[in-house]
Amino acid sequence: MYKNLELVRKIAGLTINDMSILISKTPATYYKKEIGKVATTVKEAIIISRKLNNTVEYLFSEFE
């Protein structure tokens, strides 16, 4: 699970649905990406990091 991704998304006031629209996936698919059950592409990670104004490394780190 990418805890930093979830935390930063919530702080930004964005929902799973908002993020799914951003990367053109269903909310269920985005959620699976956020919890690490489905792989996130490099392109998606960059789009997400730009939207959340954070680094890919920070958002997708599995360490706290």
Image (tube, rainbow, N blue to C red):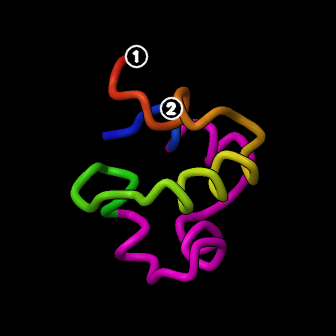
As displayed, is residue 47 above or below residue 11? Answer: below
Residue assigned mark 1 = 64
> Which residue appears farthest toward the top when viewing the image?
64
**Percent x, y for residue 22?**
66, 72
Between 54 and 12, the one lying in front of the other is: 54
**Percent x, y for residue 25?**
48, 81
Structural crowding at the residue carrying mark 2, measured as other residues with C-alpha within 10 Å and reported as few (<14), some (14–19) or many (≥20):
some
Between 16 and 42, the one lying in front of the other is: 42
As displayed, is residue 34 above or below residue 26? Answer: above
Query: In which image quadrant can residue 21 be found?
Result: bottom right
As displayed, is residue 34 above or below residue 30? Answer: above
Image quarter where the N terminus lies is top left
Residues at badges 1 and 2 in contact (C-beta under 8 Å)?
Answer: yes
Residue 45 counted in the magenta span: no
Say whether disc 1 or disc 2 marks the residue closer to the N-terminus. 2
Identify which amino acid the numbered label 1 is placed on: Glu
Q: Residue at x 75, y 53 (%)?
A: 51
| Magenta range | 6-31
Q: CA distance from mark 1 to mark 2?
A: 8 Å
Between 28 and 40, the one lying in front of the other is: 40
Q: Is residue 55 left or right of residue 41?
A: right
Residue assigned mark 2 = 4
> Which residue appears farthest toward the left when viewing the image?
37
Q: Residue at x 31, y 50 (%)?
A: 35
Q: Is residue 1 left or right of residue 58?
A: left
Q: Residue at x 39, y 38 (%)?
A: 2
**Percent x, y for residue 60?**
45, 37
Identify which amino acid the numbered label 2 is placed on: Asn
Taken as a whole, is the magenta stretch helix, strand or loop?
A: helix
